[in-house]
Amino acid sequence: MTKKHSRIIAVIMLVIAVIFIGIALNNPQASFPWSNTITYIFYGIYIIVMMVLFVAPFNKSK
């Protein structure tokens, strides 16, 4: 995966997250069919992957 691809994927993930938050704030009656703990784990994994894709292209490889 090239630096450009990594950044594009990270930006797409960020846009999807912003859209999701906007929809979630406007629909408080909606929920997932599992516990909040599992939801928070998914959110954490998503954020970590997005951050890695943003930061990885800036690391210099040998």
Image: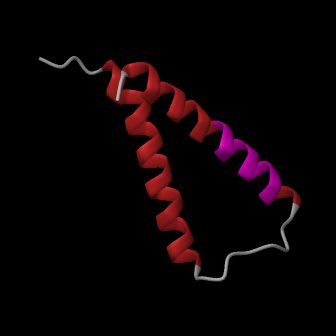
Picture quadrant where residue 12 is located: top right
Q: Position of residue 3 (x, y in %)?
A: 38, 21
Above or below 55: residue 39: below
Quarter holding the N terminus? top left
Instruction: Say if the magenta span includes residue 16.
Output: yes
Quarter holding the C terminus? top left
In the displayed image of the protein, which residue is found farthest to the left?
A: 62
Between 5 and 48, the residue placed more toward the observer is: 5
Most frequent secondary structure within the magenta stretch? helix
Between 6 and 56, the residue placed more toward the observer is: 6
Q: Is residue 57 left or right of residue 6?
A: left
Picture quadrant where residue 30 is located: bottom right
Please tell me which residue is depicted at 37% across the width and 37% down the height of the picture: 52
Above or below 14: residue 61: above
In the displayed image of the protein, which residue is found farthest to the front?
A: 1
Please tell me which residue is depicted at 42% across the width and 47% down the height of the picture: 48
Q: In this view, does 11 lie to the left or right of 46?
A: right
Please tell me which residue is depicted at 58% across the width and 41% down the height of the picture: 13
Instruction: Say if the magenta span includes residue 31.
Output: no
**Residue range highlighted in magenta:** 15-24
Between 10 and 26, the residue placed more toward the observer is: 10
Name the image colouring.
secondary structure
Q: In this view, does 15 lie to the left or right of 39?
A: right
Q: Position of residue 55 (x, y in %)?
A: 37, 28
Q: Where is residue 18 in the image (x, y as percent from the top left)?
A: 70, 43
So how many labels did they put on this image?
0
